[in-house]
Amino acid sequence: MAWFIDEVAQRVRAAARQVSDQERDALRRAVQAAPAPREFYRALAPSPQRPIGVIGEIRNLDGNPSPAPEYLEAFTEALSAGGAAAISVTAPVIPGGLGLPALRRARAIGVGPLLYRDVTVSAVQLLRARAAGADAVSLTPRILSDVELEALVERARSLGMEPCLEVESESDITRAIGCAARVIVADSRSATDYPQLFEQLPYTCVRVVRRGVRNPRDVFTAARHGAGCVIVGRALLETDDPVGLVARMATAGRHPAALLMAERIAHVTEHTLDVTEDTAQAPGLGHQPHTPAQEGTR
């Protein structure tokens, strides 16, 4: 998978360099006209009432034709009705991704908040996502330099979106903490990997598990290891009852161990939310402010 992401990142960087100033200006106007972003961090933060949340992902099964807009809207509404804390939409460069049109439809029917998952290497992508209604965007530290990562985190926050950092290693975690990231997505294929990554994070970070969550037992396992949220995609497409599956997953973490973690996070969050929100507007933690001369992500 690493080679795939690296290859996609190269293509996306090349395409971003071809974007004209006129198109950038048009995107900035579209952002100004877009609906205001919703608070993504608050929607995901665990609480004693909801120790672990579920992000339902709108995507397509590999090789299948794209679903009709009517079906997509009904499916999105079903996830929201089932208790999903947020909805994730993937970019076309990711297998099964439906892209910005699906993001716009999800925003138009009123579900949310919305996460747009992309191989993000350019500020142009952030503008497109925000113009389409995204409340949060994914960033992958491994494919970004320190300057690029800090610039994109800063730009996402300036647009009102929560940067969600998808991490694979301890090095990624260190860089995420350096950017004062509040939502960390463990991109791990093994259920034994992400607990070690989570151990390094402050309690104010919402820990999200992205892979391998297919049933309520997987949700419970994630909660037991400190996750505050899970992303569920393929499993929802393979069931005849996505509403019921989301609902069962949304309540699966109500185990004493999960509740203990949720109460601890809620206690810390209650006393530090104002501080972290102020920090979210800063360009980084312990870094110099981003300047136009550093603009490697335009």
Image (spheres, rainbow, N blue to C red):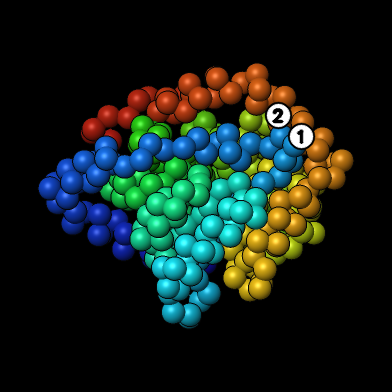
Q: CA distance from mark 1 to mark 2?
A: 8 Å
Q: Where 14 sits versus 154, above or below?
A: below
Q: Amino acid at mark 2?
A: Ala
Q: Which secondary structure lies at badge 1?
A: loop
Which residue is located at x 25 percent, y 59 percent? 14
Determine which quarter of the picture holds residue 68: bottom left
Residue 146 appears anywhere in the view: no
Q: Give 196 or 227, whichever is nearer the viewer.
A: 227
For label 1, the residue is 48
Q: Are dots 1 and 2 in contact, CB under 8 Å?
A: yes
Which class describes the residues within 10 Å of circle 1: few (<14), some (14-19), or many (20+)?
some
Determine which quarter of the picture holds residue 75: bottom right
Question: Image quadrant for the C terminus?
Answer: top left
Q: Residue furthest right?
A: 256
Which residue is located at x 38 percent, y 36 percent? 36
**Residue 298 appears left or right of 41:** left
**Residue 58 appears left or right of 160:** right
Which class describes the residues within 10 Å of circle 2: few (<14), some (14-19), or many (20+)?
many
Q: Could you tell me residue 216's position as x and y percent?
A: 77, 59
Q: Could you tell me residue 276's position as x and y percent?
A: 54, 24
Q: Give 149 or 25, whichever is nearer the viewer.
A: 25
Which residue is located at x 31 percent, y 46 percent? 131
The tag on residue 266 is 2
N-term mark: 1 or 2: 1
Q: Which secondary structure lies at badge 2?
A: helix
